[in-house]
Image (cartoon, rainbow, N blue to C red):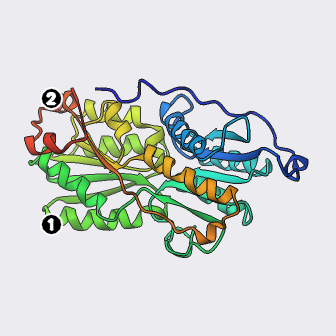
């Protein structure tokens, strides 16, 4: 029951945008897009950009006719994200689109004038991107993929699927944007009498070490989130299967890659919605006046093949409510 066989590859415009062109009334408009996580070969960024472009078309912006896009993939590498942020800002686009916190922060540190629209980050206020959700107050606004109840929901799902768990290790990016996730998760874990083990990571080696440590302890489960994890999801899915660790993820692409279960915001939907903000900014709206929006569409995916390999039986109540069951 794969969902993305229809995905078409999306390329970048490949052009540097001269300042002279920006001064012309009928000039092409330009959008720079930076993904913090994901690998170069990952279909997920292409799916999100495809949805974004299709929505822009519905709003009258035709790629190659009155708008062009330039896309960069950070692959979970901080230095690479920084370099690409410099490149895109140097092209003087009309709008910058940032997927996840590292990309948004990289843009925000470099420009206070070019409008920035983010998607798929957890806590824009806590990390200093916006003054408040209702009144962003600067050149940055966007769409959060986090609801404060989500990390608690991840732990609830783990306990339903693997009722014999005694502890949960949480793998997440080693930055301030995950403060609220870990706080909520720790409280919920305690209510289920689970030991909560935070495992902030910055690179592939730290992810592997966290998984191996959890595997040495009986009754372990994992919850995984963050851009570093997204760029390493194939390895994570492989190691958790190898060590027979029940694991819950925030996004559907983990389950589509062989992971056990996911619950979270629909990343494709966020990019469709973000196109409306790009459209409004291109027509003169100020990002400071566009409130940050929370996710409205959530997905629950279950991989029965992964569950069988782990010796787990998925409750019928979950199968009934799942948006997709992969067999």
Point out the image quarter for the N terminus: top left
Instruction: Tell me if residue 199 comes above or below residue 141 in the rendering.
Output: above
| Residue 290, position as x, y percentages in the image | 57, 67
Question: Total of numbered circles in the picture?
Answer: 2
Dot 2, crowdedness within 10 Å: few (<14), some or many (≥20)?
few
Q: Is residue 16 left or right of residue 232?
A: right
For this orientation, the residue located farthest to the top is: 5
Q: Residue at x 59, y 51 (%)?
A: 98
Q: Circle 1 is placed at which residue position? A: 191
Q: Is residue 147 left or right of residue 167?
A: right
Name the image quarter holding residue 138. Answer: bottom right
For this rendering, which residue is in front, 44 or 237?
A: 44
N-terminal label among 2 and 1: 1
| Residue 305, position as x, y percentages in the image | 20, 27
Instruction: Tell me if residue 53 comes above or below residue 102 in the rendering.
Output: above
For this rendering, which residue is in front, 212 or 314?
A: 314
In the drawing, what numbered circle is on residue 37?
Answer: none
| Residue 260, position as x, y percentages in the image | 25, 37
For this orientation, the residue located farthest to the right is: 20
Label 2 sits on a secondary structure element that is helix
Label 1 sits on a secondary structure element that is helix
Instruction: Tell me if residue 195 comes above or below residue 252 in the rendering.
Output: below
Dot 1, crowdedness within 10 Å: few (<14), some or many (≥20)?
few
Q: Is residue 131 left or right of residue 315?
A: right
Instruction: Tell me if residue 4 comes above or below residue 232 in the rendering.
Output: above
Mark 2 and mark 1 residues within 8 Å of each other at the beta carbon: no
Point out the image quarter for the C terminus: top left
Q: Circle 2 is placed at which residue position? A: 308
Q: Residue at x 25, y 60 (%)?
A: 152
Q: Residue at x 25, y 53 (%)?
A: 154
Distance from Cα at disc 2 to Cα at disc 1: 28 Å
For this rendering, which residue is in front, 271 or 123?
A: 271
């Amino acid at each position: 029951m794969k969902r993305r066989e229809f995905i078409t590859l999306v390329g970048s415009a490949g052009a540097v945008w001269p300042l002279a062109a920006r001064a012309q009334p009928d000039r092409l408009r330009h959008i720079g897009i930076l993904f913090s996580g994901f690998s170069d070969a990952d279909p997920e960024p292409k799916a999100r950009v495809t949805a974004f472009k299709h929505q822009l078309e519905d709003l009258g912006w035709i790629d190659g006719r009155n708008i062009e896009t330039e896309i960069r993939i950070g692959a979970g590498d901080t230095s690479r994200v920084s370099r690409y942020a410099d490149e895109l800002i140097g092209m003087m686009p009309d709008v910058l689109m940032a997927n996840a916190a590292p990309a948004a922060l990289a843009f925000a540190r470099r420009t206070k004038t070019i409008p920035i629209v983010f998607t798929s980050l957890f806590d824009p206020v806590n990390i200093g991107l916006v003054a408040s959700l209702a009144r962003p107050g600067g050149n940055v606004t966007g769409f959060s993929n986090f609801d404060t109840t989500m990390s608690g929901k991840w732990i609830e799902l783990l306990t339903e699927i693997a009722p014999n768990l005694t502890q949960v290790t949480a793998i997440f990016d080693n930055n301030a944007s995950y403060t609220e996730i870990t706080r909520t998760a720790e409280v919920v874990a305690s209510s289920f009498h689970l030991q909560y083990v935070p495992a902030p990571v910055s690179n592939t080696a730290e992810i592997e070490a966290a998984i191996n440590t959890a595997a040495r302890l009986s009754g372990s489960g994992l919850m995984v989130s963050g851009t570093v994890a997204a760029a390493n999801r194939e390895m994570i899915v492989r190691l958790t299967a190898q060590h027979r660790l029940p694991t819950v993820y925030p996004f559907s692409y983990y389950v589509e890659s062989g992971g056990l279960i996911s619950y979270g915001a629909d990343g494709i939907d966020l990019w469709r919605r973000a196109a409306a903000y790009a459209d409004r900014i291109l027509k003169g709206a100020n990002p400071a006046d566009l409130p940050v929006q929370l996710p409205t569409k959530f997905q629950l995916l279950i991989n029965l093949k992964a569950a069988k390999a782990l010796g787990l039986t998925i409750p019928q109540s979950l199968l009934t409510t799942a948006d997709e069951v992969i067999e």
